[in-house]
Image (tube, rainbow, N blue to C red):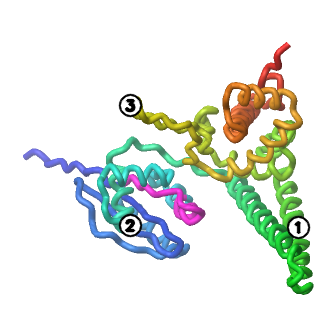
């Protein structure tokens, strides 16, 4: 008597990640099951991982939303579960294709499950532990720097009013001083941490060879760039940073000016902005490139974005070939 062979059908899982809750939708045979909820805590994340481990070959899809997804992604990856992590814009556009009229956590989880089912699988690459630690330091420095800028602006505004009590100005000055000390302390911690890890120390030294990139900018850039998947091209780096141009043209009547997509890591863009301004002011080759763009009709902001994009190209090449910045390759000055 012939033995009947059972063929297991692929299982696709979508997880909508929130600060407090995780919504799980399992999809099998093109049918989505009822959403399940888990708390976004270490204990419940492990319970969710254990649940998915009982589904051999399951493909899990979630969004890279803020910082809340990372612990879950690490737990899933360490358990050997097939995982893809999407740019939120990708899932947003996919939901439009599905003509989703409602937006709830359960609906979003189902959208992610359908994305995993219909789209090509792209495995999430687990970042190195030291890279994650550096990014945490860099982003904390970034937050404190923004707080300091806000306090400085507030102090400047209140100084103009004779009605502002001196106690308020003293408190603001104290707050700014404390923020400066905290930023300096974290920057020292970050530099010590980088020097203790050769995989970070060498690219950090390479970044400092770029005129315009100081230690603070280098920490911010390295904290983000070291988490990009290995093997990406320079164009893919630009896309990850959201610095790729977005064109809007339709027929003969609609032809808008190209803008950067911003569909990527805003921290990379923020970390590149001041170095681009500094480089175009102090590096003759970068300045020549910027002036060439302006002479050919680009606006100053378009020129700065182009410098940021080309700096990212250069950094990609520096890391790939372990070579310091060569400004002559950035732009050849006319003889």
Q: Earlier in the sequence, mark 2 or mark 1?
A: 2
Distance in Å between CA atoms under marks 3 and 2: 43 Å
The secondary structure type at the circle numbered 1 is: helix
The residue furthest left is 1
Q: Which mark is residue 24?
A: 2
Q: Are marks 2 and 1 in contact (CB under 8 Å)?
A: no
Distance in Å between CA atoms under marks 1 and 3: 53 Å
Query: 310 or 220: nearer the eye?
Result: 310
Residue at figure coordinates x 30%, y 50% from the top left: 10
The secondary structure type at the circle numbered 2 is: strand
Q: Which residue is mark 3?
A: 251
Q: Which mark is residue 280?
A: none
Please count the marks in the image: 3
Q: Which mark is residue 180?
A: 1
Q: Work out whether 75 lies above or below 175.
A: above
Query: 16 or 89: nearer the eye?
Result: 89
Residue 95 screen position, x and y as percent: 36, 54
Residue at figure coordinates x 60%, y 36% from the top left: 232
Distance in Å between CA atoms under marks 2 and 1: 43 Å
Residue 284 sits in quarter? top right
Residue 92 screen position, x and y as percent: 42, 54
Could you tell whether 331 is left or right of 94 in the image? right
Residue 246 screen position, x and y as percent: 53, 38
Judge the density around disc 1: few (<14), some (14-19), many (≥20) Cα neighbours within 10 Å.
some
Query: Where are the magenta residues, as a range?
Result: 58-73
Q: Is residue 82 visible?
A: yes
Query: 252 or 220: nearer the eye?
Result: 252
Q: Is residue 312 visible?
A: no
Q: Earlier in the sequence, mark 3 or mark 2?
A: 2
């Amino acid at each position: 008597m012939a033995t009947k062979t059972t063929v297991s059908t692929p299982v696709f899982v979508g997880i909508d990640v929130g600060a407090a809750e995780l919504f799980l939708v399992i999809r099998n045979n093109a049918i989505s099951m009822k959403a399940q909820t888990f708390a976004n805590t270490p204990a419940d994340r492990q319970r969710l991982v254990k649940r998915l481990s009982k589904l051999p070959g399951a493909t899990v899809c979630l969004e890279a939303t803020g910082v809340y997804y990372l612990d879950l992604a690490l737990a899933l990856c360490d358990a050997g579960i097939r995982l893809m992590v999407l740019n939120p814009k990708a899932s947003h556009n996919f939901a439009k294709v599905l003509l989703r009229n409602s937006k709830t956590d359960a609906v979003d989880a189902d959208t992610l499950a359908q994305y995993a089912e219909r789209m090509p699988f792209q495995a999430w690459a687990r970042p190195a532990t030291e890279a994650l630690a550096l990014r945490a330091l860099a982003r904390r420095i970034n937050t404190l720097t923004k707080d300091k800028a806000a306090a400085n602006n507030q102090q400047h505004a209140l100084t103009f009013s004779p009605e502002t009590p001196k106690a308020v100005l003293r408190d603001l000055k104290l707050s700014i001083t404390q923020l400066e000390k905290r930023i300096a302390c974290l920057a020292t911690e970050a530099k010590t941490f980088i020097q203790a890890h050769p995989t970070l120390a060498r690219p950090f030294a390479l970044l400092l060879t770029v005129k315009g990139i100081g230690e603070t900018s280098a920490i911010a850039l390295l904290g983000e760039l070291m988490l990009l998947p290995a093997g990406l091209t320079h164009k893919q780096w630009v896309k990850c940073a959201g610095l790729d141009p977005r064109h809007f043209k339709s027929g003969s009547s609609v032809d808008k000016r190209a803008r950067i997509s911003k569909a990527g890591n805003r921290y990379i863009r923020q970390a590149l902005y001041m170095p681009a301004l500094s480089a175009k002011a102090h590096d003759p080759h970068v300045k020549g490139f910027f002036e060439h763009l302006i002479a050919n009709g680009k606006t100053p902001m378009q020129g700065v974005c182009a410098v940021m994009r080309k700096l990212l190209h250069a950094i990609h090449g520096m890391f790939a070939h372990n070579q310091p910045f060569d400004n002559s390759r950035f732009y050849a000055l006319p003889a």
